[in-house]
Amino acid sequence: MQTERVTFLTTPDHKAMLDAFARDSGISVGHMLREASSQYMAEAPLNEDEKLAILVAELNEAVPAIAESFDRMTALIDDAYAELQQLRTERKKADAQ
């Protein structure tokens, strides 16, 4: 098998993680990267409809939590407004006396 050299730059921390993973797996870093890149390229890229379906599912999951958060914020604002109104009323009574 004829081979060619491929070089890429990475951080020292990432290099250490690659070394440790390969060592723990009992393979070389080169073998691990060849296998990982082969698997990456073999995966079929998602088409636009598949990407959209994933986004819609994520939004459908997130929207109820967002709505609950807005409801809690609205309640807190309403409570603060009521408290301010009460303080204003009490101050007017105190000033009138």
Image (tube, rainbow, N blue to C red):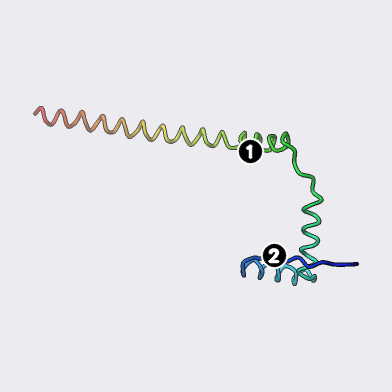
Name which residue lies at 75% across and 38% down: 47
User: Residue 10 appears in which quarter of the rendering?
Assistant: bottom right
Q: Nearer the viewer, residue 56 or 28?
A: 28
Q: Is residue 34 above or below residue 81?
A: below
Q: Secondary structure under badge 1? A: helix
Tag 2 secondary structure: loop
Residue, disc 2: 8
Q: Earlier in the sequence, mark 2 or mark 1?
A: 2
Task: Quarter of the image for the C terminus: give it.
Answer: top left
Rendered position, 97 above or below 21? above
Per the image, the residue denoted by label 1 is 58
Residue 33: x and y in percent read 76, 63
Indicate whether 62 appears above or below 34.
above
Structural distance between the alpha carbons of marks 2 and 1: 34 Å
Foreground mark, 2 or 1? 2
Number of marks: 2
**Residue 85 versus residue 31: which sits nearer the camera?**
31
The 10 Å Cα crowd at callout 2, few under 14, some 14 to 19, many 20 or more, is few
- Residues 42 and 96: in front is 42
